[in-house]
Image (cartoon, coloured by chain):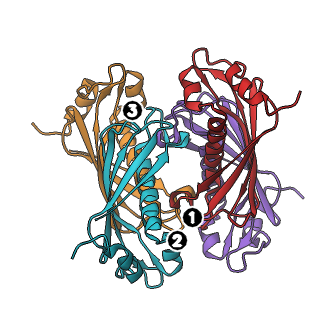
Chain colours: A orange, B cyan, C red, D purple
Amino acid sequence: MYVYELNLRVRYAETDQMQYVYYGNYATYFEVARVEALRNLGYSYKKLEQEGVMMPVLENFSKFIRPARYDDLLRICVRVEELPTARMRFDYEIYNEENTLLHIGYTLLVFVSTQTMRPVRCPDTMTNLLEKFFNK
Amino acid sequence: MYVYELNLRVRYAETDQMQYVYYGNYATYFEVARVEALRNLGYSYKKLEQEGVMMPVLENFSKFIRPARYDDLLRICVRVEELPTARMRFDYEIYNEENTLLHIGYTLLVFVSTQTMRPVRCPDTMTNLLEKFFNK
Amino acid sequence: MYVYELNLRVRYAETDQMQYVYYGNYATYFEVARVEALRNLGYSYKKLEQEGVMMPVLENFSKFIRPARYDDLLRICVRVEELPTARMRFDYEIYNEENTLLHIGYTLLVFVSTQTMRPVRCPDTMTNLLEKFFNK
Amino acid sequence: MYVYELNLRVRYAETDQMQYVYYGNYATYFEVARVEALRNLGYSYKKLEQEGVMMPVLENFSKFIRPARYDDLLRICVRVEELPTARMRFDYEIYNEENTLLHIGYTLLVFVSTQTMRPVRCPDTMTNLLEKFFNK
């Protein structure tokens, strides 16, 4: 299992009049968490797209336990529990500074060739970087 | 079961560099669908909040079948399959103009008093407006 | 001068914890106003991009007179005061249902070829559709 | 003059199908820059609101020189050129990693009491923290 943690500050733009983070904005937090988890591995999602593979989303799930609020410094814990094949799943837990669990969720993505627009397998370079976190 | 349909045009702001609607923006489409479904019943979500009840989200799920794209005139079909009690669930299907199913999802919300910040039951006025769509 | 008006409902997603429309979201309202003003002329911005011309923004200005709020049904009045050449300017006024002026602004855009990424002149088809609104 | 610089990474959510940062998202970058500039002074915008003063926007201006793109690590340079009185102005310059100037802009804000909803003067604590950057 590969686990990565990052901190992210809630922006005013992300709040709504309920004084909570608007529920749709957690998907953006998930995106940042995935991209930074890959960058920490030595992998750039930007470069992946430049090399002709993109990762559209198949499923996204959010469970709202307690609201995140303006200026909260969130801690996002992102996990890859299985080596990706044609698909890749990221699981998330979001905590506030008091270490209270606010939110859990997951995103399931697929690898697609930008040329053929057809599914492809996870690039070897990504698999190689992830393999050391998974026991045989 | 209460069913409502609305049309909604994809904005440029909602696209991303994959030339798809960004995956987090479906939550906003769901919000518009819920609010317009209630308005069509004769119920105003704005008024609900002014009267001291808000509806934060407990769960949100999105399944991405095909991408929505810039300027698509989407048809969103929203369903309330059960009379709300302490919670209320909305299910959605999103189609494009060629009647292709692009997206399905649901949102589970809870009724909360803005004074006590504690859960309350669905207001009677909403229940009364919905009841005629549900067989005893 | 070409003038067009449209109505647009404020979404919950667009509010912030001040209970106002977040200041950055007016740019999205401007975008919707421009695109619908062109559609009303018989011109599709989507088609313009498909034909190889895009319109990035050069300048954007917003003056906030009174706040727009959740669920307000805004009336956006958009004006093209000069025939576009290499650039095109849209001016906006936003009113609420009580006809109170909430917001004014403008956007200056440029025509760019998506092939060469260099500026081009306003396409003749757009000029032809606009010409009847301008006196010689 | 008080000057502060911060880095900010462009999110996928912030791009549009032109493969640029959507023009409305610069307002969010400006917001982050203002709030972090104040935090660096020892001042919390969140606390300001909790103490009953908010800062709605009066004017916002953006000039787009070159596009910011996905995953760019932007450097935002924010300046306060005058001691705030009833109003406060922030000026911004945004650079990419190659030190190319991409964007300039400003925001003019006003201090408002959340109780009376009327303008108030800049709180003394903020003025005191800023004063050392301004010559008599």
Q: Is residue C19 above or below residue B4?
A: below
Vertical side of D77 occupied by B31: above or below: below
- In the structure shown, which secondary structural element does the residue marked by tag 3 occupy? helix
The numbered mark at residue C88 is none
Residue lying at the far bottom in this picture: please name it: B116
The residue type indicated by label 1 comes to: Asp
Q: Work out which residue is located at the far left of the displayed protein and give it.
A: A136
Secondary structure beneath dot 1 equals loop
Q: Nearer the viewer, residue C78 or B114?
A: C78
Residue C109 rendering spot, x and y as whole percentages: 71, 32
Q: Which residue is mark 2?
A: B46
Spatial CA span between label 2 and label 1: 7 Å
Question: In the depicted view, which residue is nearer to us: A23 or D124?
Answer: A23
Image side of residue C15 versus residue D131, left or right: left
Circles 2 and 1: CB atoms closer than 8 Å: yes
Q: Is residue C125 left or right of residue A129?
A: right
| Pointer 2 and pointer 1 on the same chain | no
* Residue D57 position by quadrant: bottom right
Q: Which residue is mark 3?
A: A45
Please tell me in which quadrant of the rendered image residue C136 appears. top right
Q: Amino acid at mark 2?
A: Lys
Mark 2 residue element: helix
Task: Report if residue A13 is visible in the image.
Answer: yes
Numbered circle sitting on residue C71: 1
Are discs 3 and 2 less than 8 Å apart at CB?
no
Outermost residue on the top side: it is C116
Residue at figure coordinates x 37%, y 69% from the top left: A66
Seen at 67% across and 40% down, the residue is: C37
Question: What is the spatial separation of the Cα atoms under label 3 and label 1, in whole angstroms?
Answer: 38 Å
